Image (cartoon, rainbow, N blue to C red):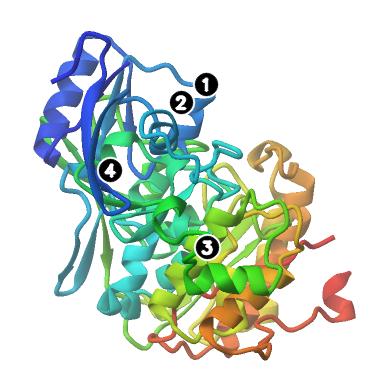
Amino acid sequence: MSSDDGRVPLALTLNGIAAERPVDPASTLAEALRDDFGLSGVRIGCANGDCGTCTAMVAGVPVKTCLMLVQRAEDATVWTLEGIGTANGPTAMQEAFVAAYGFQCGFCLPGMIFAAQALLDRDPNPPDPAIRDAVSGNICRCTGYHNVVVAVRRAAGHQEPTDELTDPPLTAEQRD
Amino acid sequence: MRVHRPTSPADTARLLAELTGSKESVEMIAGGSNVVPELTRGERHPNHLLDLGRAGLGQIEMNGPSITLGALVTYQQFLDHSEARRAVPLLAQLCGGITGGIQLRSQGTLGGSACAARPHSDLPSALVALEARMRIRSVAGIREVSAAEFLLDAEQAVLTGFELLESIVIDRPDPSHSAVHRKLKFAEGSWPIMTASATRGAHATGATCLVLGGLARTPWRFDLPGPVLDVEQCATHVRDSVAAAPESHLWRDIYAGPEYRRRVGPVLAARALAELARTEVSHDDFGSTPSNTTGGAS
């Protein structure tokens, strides 16, 4: 059922609270979360699924909300940055990013936090290649990524790098 | 633009027939990673969107000698299915290396990628190497075609306007087979330039099969002399075949032209074959850490 302007009701559990708003069914979840539900913790950096700053948790899975039609989130449990910690009560991952200088401008931060947390939820003690892979869908223009990795290591409870080269360096012959 | 949300494959086929019969334009959305950005940018203006998110296409079925992957099975879903992952290590390697991080692996679908038929994307070469069968549904029923037939041309699958890809069927490779999926890309976040999917002993003949994606408009299969894998001999065969191909046969896009692909295709093939020769695949060992990327070759 839709209203005269074509908008349809969307009900979901948003940051722990039941919520419903009329949405444009042709919009993305990123647009609806920002424009209809009033949340800015989901950001639109590229609208192409590259930068990852639109990442939110939908039904327990980190997704790029700029790639998701809004009704895919119907009846789902959705978490955005607003729902996972506060300035006075940050999560362990948020604390780790602060302590490790894992961000500068902060624009990429929501996506980094969710991608990293999704990794630790699967693997509480990931090696560095797994950390880099987990955040590989998130672009950061500020940090050079090293402190992002340090932050996730910190959140996982270890400080030492665990680099494992997975591809041997090219030989001179292979480089020609 | 009207959004429809069919609730079963049959419902989807019925809607497709009804809407295409009305001569209005229809787009289907699987994972959304290809189509949704184009809608956002205004590059596509369909009259109707079919959102396949609840059309019942997301199952993985282990059916004895074959595995059926619903068109909306995501890369991460495949990785999380331990039996499927162990049975088809080539696909597991591919899924673990999908660009875009854990988000894209959780959203991108095997069926969506197959239907997009982009030469440089990860899946096409693997589907041909696995001799996958593509199950297509319409109101007229189900038909099945080989992956090679399905990938009709660059960015063109064999589907008519009233058909949908329902599932991908893979015959279980021999458990002792070896498999390697490698790709060439210039940066972590970029699309592949080319892919190489190689298997040995996967099919009844026991031979080595190498498929290069992104070299030509459709995956280029090389059935290589065997059963003993002579890497040098096979690499020479690939190099000679590629050298003889007319330029019009080779793929070009914004990432690389045909002559670059002609040069790097044999290199990628040689590396994949070399790895195949020394690989004894651990069918348990595929998580989300990519190990199949070759950095940019000059």
Q: Can you identify the residue that label 3 sits on?
A: A113
Q: Distance between the residues labelled 2 and 3?
A: 28 Å
Q: Report x, y in % for residue B146.
A: 32, 51
Q: What residue type is labelled 2?
A: Leu
Q: Is mark 2 on a helix, strand or loop?
A: helix
Return the residue nearer the eye: B200 or B81.
Answer: B81
Q: Which amino acid does label 1 sit on?
A: Glu
Residue B1 seen = yes
Callout 1 touching callout 4 (CB < 8 Å): no
Q: How far apart are marks 2 and 4 (CA)?
A: 18 Å
Q: Report x, y in % for residue B12.
A: 16, 33
B185 versus B2 height, above or below: below
Q: Report x, y in % for residue A69.
A: 35, 35
Locate the C terminus of chain B and report the quarter of the image it occupies. bottom right
Callout 1 touching callout 2 (CB < 8 Å): yes
The chain identifier of the residue carrying mark 4 reads A
Callout 2 touching callout 4 (CB < 8 Å): no
**Badge 1: how crowded within 10 Å, few (<14), some, or many (20+)?**
few
The chain identifier of the residue carrying mark 2 reads B
Q: Can you identify the residue that label 2 sits on?
A: B39
Q: Distance between the residues labelled 3 and 4?
A: 20 Å
Nearer to us of marks 3 and 4 is 3
Q: Residue at x 49, y 87 (%)?
A: A125
Q: Can you identify the residue that label 1 sits on?
A: B43
Q: Distance between the residues labelled 1 and 4?
A: 24 Å
Q: Which amino acid does label 3 sit on?
A: Ile
Q: Is mark 3 on a helix, strand or loop?
A: helix
**Badge 3: how crowded within 10 Å, few (<14), some, or many (20+)?**
many
